[in-house]
Image (cartoon, rainbow, N blue to C red):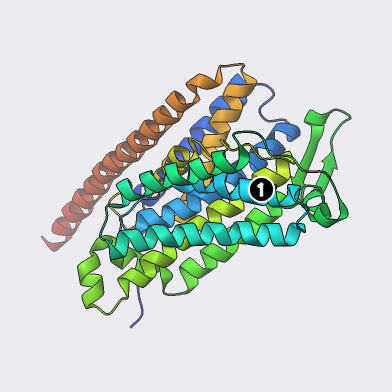
Amino acid sequence: MKQHKKPFRLSNLPNSLYVLFVVFIAASLAVPKFLTPGNLSNLILQSSILLLLSFGMSLVLMTGCIDLSVGGILSMTGVVMATMLRMNVPAIWAIAIGLLTGVLFGTMNGLLITKLRLPSFITTFATMGIAQSIANVVSEKRTVYWDPKPSNSLIDTLGKDFIRIEFGQTAKEVLTISYLVLITAVVITVVMLLFNKTTLKSRVFAIGENEEIARLAGIKTHFWQIGIYAASGLLAAMASLLVLIRTNSLQPTTGEGLEFQAVVAAVLGGNTLKGGKGSLTGTILGALALYSVRSALSLAGIDTSVVMIVIGAVLILGMWLNETIQMYEERIVGMLRSILMGRNHGHNA
């Protein structure tokens, strides 16, 4: 049976599209340095880290759960990789073990929630603290550095620019796309293909709408939920890898607070806390919107302590825009229907 596409409606677009548009225009007009090639390069690179976290968060939210441990996993896996590099472990093995650590920690979250029937909010809040504590203990609450050696030359290679376009002599006039952005693009492309071209999307949405009905329909709900949490842990570990390569070091507190930003980016993208629906494309726009805000505030010289306040305001703005557009759209559609019905009655008479 051929499925008919739903009619296009502005209200079906993610909140993040409206927010990104408003923020980008406002920042471009208010902050002269915002649209420079150098700042746009930094904006894309910095949002890549949040984007990976937000993708994992979005998948979890679609199942009707939440993962507050992503920030802690980022800190913990980053410290694991950095410590191994400091111990002269080859970079490829350090990265592999760090990513595996993220997967195992995410799997543990899934098992605790599905097998013990623990609430996802409380469970991941607790494991966030556990992961962050492991990061602090292993690093002794100090930034972890390592000496550049042939065994970790892969880190230096991945930190280089893939594309470099010079519009002038100063750093702000140079547009760069690093290998880190390329890695992020590949990862999100793979995730989106799996989500849209396999049964992943239908399974996740079914679990989010009603887990019991999904189970009765033959869906292995626990299997998919554990897998989603494992994927979230992997994406958080990959985000920590980007931080590690970008800074050539790792602070044990790097991930603190990023779980909140990941939730905001995901919700702006159209992923509700109730589950059963969502958008990965919207999540991309949400991450870009948040880092546009952060970049504009930084360039304007505003204290970073107000960033979280502004991010919360951005979330409210996005929800308000969506509700307003939906309200006016429904009014316009209703008026058009009334006009058409009136004409039809006139012709029949």
The image shows residue 319 at horizontal and vertical percentages of 34, 37
The total number of labels drawn is 1
Residue appearing at x 61%, y 29% in the figure: 295
Quadrant in the picture for the C terminus: bottom left
Q: Which residue, as the protein is rendered here, is positioned at the far bottom? A: 1
Q: Which residue is mark 1?
A: 242
For label 1, the crowd category at 10 Å Cα-Cα, with few meaning under 14, some 14 to 19 and many 20 or more, is many
Residue appearing at x 43%, y 53% in the figure: 58
Residue appearing at x 48%, y 57% in the figure: 105
Q: Which residue, as the protein is rendered here, is positioned at the far left? A: 349
For this rendering, which residue is in front, 318 or 58? 58
Left or right of residue 285: residue 181: right
Query: Mark 1 belongs to which amino acid?
Result: Leu
Label 1: which secondary element: helix
Residue appearing at x 54%, y 55% in the figure: 235
- Regarding residue 90, the answer to whether it shows in the image is yes
The image shows residue 17 at horizontal and vertical percentages of 47, 43
- Regarding residue 202, the answer to whether it shows in the image is no
Displayed quadrant of residue 335 = top left
Quadrant in the picture for the N terminus: bottom left
Displayed quadrant of residue 205 = bottom left
For this rendering, which residue is in front, 155 or 296? 155
The image shows residue 309 at horizontal and vertical percentages of 43, 24
